[in-house]
Image (cartoon, rainbow, N blue to C red):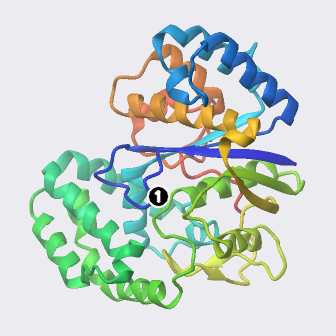
Amino acid sequence: MDLACDESGSEGERLVGGVTDVFAHASVRLPTEVAAECVQELRRQIRSPATEYKANHLLREKNRRTLVWLFGPSGPILGQARVHLTDKEFFVVRRIVDLLVDDADHAASLGLCQGREAWIMAVTLYREGRRGFPRDRWNGFLEAFKYLLRPRNRRGVWLSVDDFYQVVNDLRGRSAGPAEEILGLLPKARARLESVLEGLLDRPGSAPALNPIIPAIVSAVAYWGADGVPVSIVHDIQTALTAEHVGQLRQLFGGPGSGPLTGGPGRARLSTVPGLAPAGRLAGLTFVESHLDPRVQVADFLAGTARRIASDTLNRRGDPELVGLLRPYVDPASIWADEPSWSALAPAPVSRPGSCCSCG
């Protein structure tokens, strides 16, 4: 099976304090000729002088009818596309919880799935932390952890573990309740954190610990390849994904010498533990300029539009009609913890986000 993929909202591993708060990754299963006809019809309806059309063209109010056509039952992509959403702030919180819970599901799926104990703890810290702590202190805590694990941090710009725990101490005591209790567990996880950082230094080519594109690709392959059909992906160019990362993804999905991945954030390695890796098989992953492949252009339209709609919904300014159009495309395994927005975005029926994939 051939898939075309693209993303929107990528700022590398800058997940907090960036321009966007949502990352969206779209996968589209369309023949090239159908995708080309779709792009041509969008050009005919939008009538912009731009040489390359993007999602922002579709999101203009004057082009609303075109957006409704593309996403709706008379368009070409319903049932042939899917979008995985990530609330970037929650993504960082999940990585923090990785230090506190030895979660085999999470490690074996490269961050897509999360066991029940870890998921409950991550959601609690995310929801209560946002409500209970001063926003600047909460953001500073997330940014400190993010910076500790960033690749640039391994190239000479250093934030020490002591510095991180000072930020944790500054945050503690500023709120009561479950979030404060979870933060109280972090000092006991110091040895695990130091081990993670050592692993990042020892294996600089390992899958990025704080890049949401990794679990998004895992989810796409697990969904489209659930019946055992090998999946080949053509993807818009991603400089953050090296040949080594692609090799790790192929091994995860049953390539030569494969097995589930374990080891915690930034330390994913092959294991022989059975039953944890996602279903599916990744036959290949190649990169192209999006404007050269109409299938990737369609994925770009979906990803960019989905990111904007999801972000607006997360920030309580969602458009009911657009949310309704997006809902059938949303991946139930999206990494999301905000209950009001997920209630609007989630396809029905669906369980909690981030908990259901083909693992196990």
259 to the left or right of 182: right
Task: Decide: is 139 above or below 319.
Answer: below
Rendered position, 196 above or below 352: below
The residue labelled by disc 1 is 119
Binning the other alpha carbons within 10 Å of mark 1 as few (below 14), some (14 to 19) or many (20 upward) gives many
Q: Is residue 119 above or below residue 70?
A: below
- Local secondary structure at mark 1: helix
- Image x and y of residue 144, in percent: 25, 68
| 34 displayed left or right of 306 | right
Q: Position of residue 34 (x, y in %)?
A: 84, 27
Q: Residue at x 66, y 21 (%)?
A: 71
- In the image: residue 127, left or right of residue 170: right
Whether 293 is drawn above or below 123: the answer is above
Q: Is residue 112 visible?
A: no
In this view of the protein, which residue sits in the foreground, 31 or 128?
31
User: In the rendered view of the protein, which quadrant contains the C terminus?
Assistant: bottom right
